[in-house]
Amino acid sequence: MSADTARLPAALRQVANGIFVSGQVLPEHVAALAEAGYTTIICNRPDHEAPGQPTAAEIEAEAGKQGIAFYFVPVGQAGITRDMVDTMQKALSEADGLVLAYCRSGARSAHMCTFARP
């Protein structure tokens, strides 16, 4: 990974081989993620959870410009469902390269990655 870490999302950490989680991704992070070798971004944060938060569509648009696959698997206050885990498993199984899943702090994404492992 050669991208300047200051341009990467906060609290970026590895949770499995090739799978990372982080806090909120901003549109300006996406180019640095592509430069660092990420090929898939998974958003586990519902839109409009906090004021000023970029929407999943905004991040998806930037990901598309960088050739990064994007999945929206939001986990809200109701918690994690079987359908969410199934969708997360599909996203992880289709990933070819480094994956970044994000939410507000990375905690929900870490749980989703754990639950979605085969």
Image (cartoon, rainbow, N blue to C red):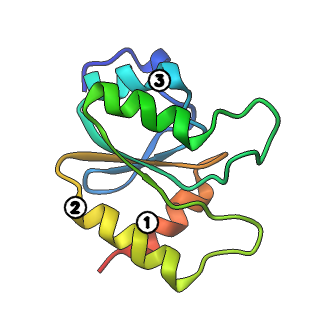
Within the image, what quadrant is residue 34 found in?
top left
Q: Residue furthest right?
A: 51
Q: Name the one closer to the observer, 73 or 113.
A: 73
Q: Measuring 52% from the left and 30% from the top, which residue is drawn there? A: 9
| Mark toward the start of the polypeptide (2 vs 1) | 2
**Within 10 angstroms of label 3, few (less than 14), some, or many (20 or more) residues?**
some
Along the viewing direction, whichever of 33 and 18 lies nearer the viewer:
33
- What's the amino acid at mark 1? Cys
Question: Number of numbered discs present?
Answer: 3
Mark 1 or mark 3: whose residue is earlier in sequence: 3
Q: Is residue 94 left or right of residue 54?
A: left
Residue sitting at x 44%, y 31%: 61
Q: Position of 92 compared to 7: left or right? A: left
Residue drawn 71% across and 64% down? 76
For marks 3 and 2, the one nearer the N-term is: 3
| Nearest the eye: 73 or 16 | 73
- Kind of residue indicated by mark 2: Glu
Q: Which residue is mark 1?
A: 113
The secondary structure type at the circle numbered 3 is: helix
Identify the disc placed on residue 94: 2
Using the rendered view, name the quadrant where residue 32 is placed.
top left
Q: Which mark, residue 29?
A: 3
**Whether residue 4 is situated above or below residue 23 in the rendered picture:** above
Say if 51 sits above or below 110 in the image.
above
